[in-house]
Image (cartoon, rainbow, N blue to C red):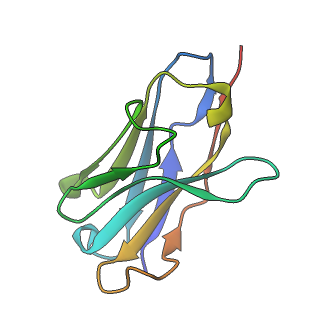
Amino acid sequence: QVQLVESGGGLVQPGGSLRLSCVASGTPFSIYNMGWYRQAPGKQRELVASITTGGSPNYADSVKGRFTISRDNAKNTVYLQMNSLKPEDTAVYYCNAKPIWLPASSGSWGQGTQVTVSS
């Protein structure tokens, strides 16, 4: 089973940027479709962005044009570049990995990293 460790969260002012990283270990990284989810207090966890094994990205409407997901298979790492951050982006961000033969599974999760957007 894959293990995921996120990093890069923190406190940033509105309009600022952060880059989240998620390092995977335990099994070959290239077999996983990867995703970033977030959960704000009192809200359900939601998909922010995902990227297939072939590098095709998908974004939630709320982050299109501001966030960019990418992956480096050589480093077993997926990134989320977040620009023009807004207070409503405040949440715990989680990395998720789903094997390509189980696209409907819940997948494996990291421990999460807090992102706070506030002045």
Which image quarter: residue 101?
Answer: bottom left
Q: Is residue 23 above or below residue 79?
A: below
Q: Residue at x 28, y 68 (%)?
A: 29
Residue found at the very far bottom of the displayed protein: 101
Residue found at the very far right of the displayed protein: 42
Q: As rendered, which of 28 and 118 lies closer to the eye? A: 118
Q: As rendered, which of 44 and 109 lies closer to the eye? A: 44
Q: Quadrant of the N terminus?
A: bottom left
**Residue 2, position in %: x, y?**
42, 74
Which image quarter: residue 28?
Answer: bottom left
Q: Is residue 48 above or below residue 84?
A: below
**Residue 104, position in %: x, y?**
44, 81
Q: Is residue 76 left or right of residue 117?
A: left
Q: As rendered, which of 19 and 25 lies closer to the eye? A: 19
Which image quarter: residue 11?
Answer: top right
Q: Residue at x 46, y 69 (%)?
A: 3
Q: How many numbered marks are there? A: 0
Q: Is residue 8 left or right of residue 119?
A: left
Q: Residue at x 71, y 59 (%)?
A: 44
Q: Residue at x 25, y 74 (%)?
A: 31
**Residue 15, position in %: x, y?**
54, 16
Q: Is residue 6 left or right of residue 46?
A: left
Q: Quadrant of the C terminus?
A: top right
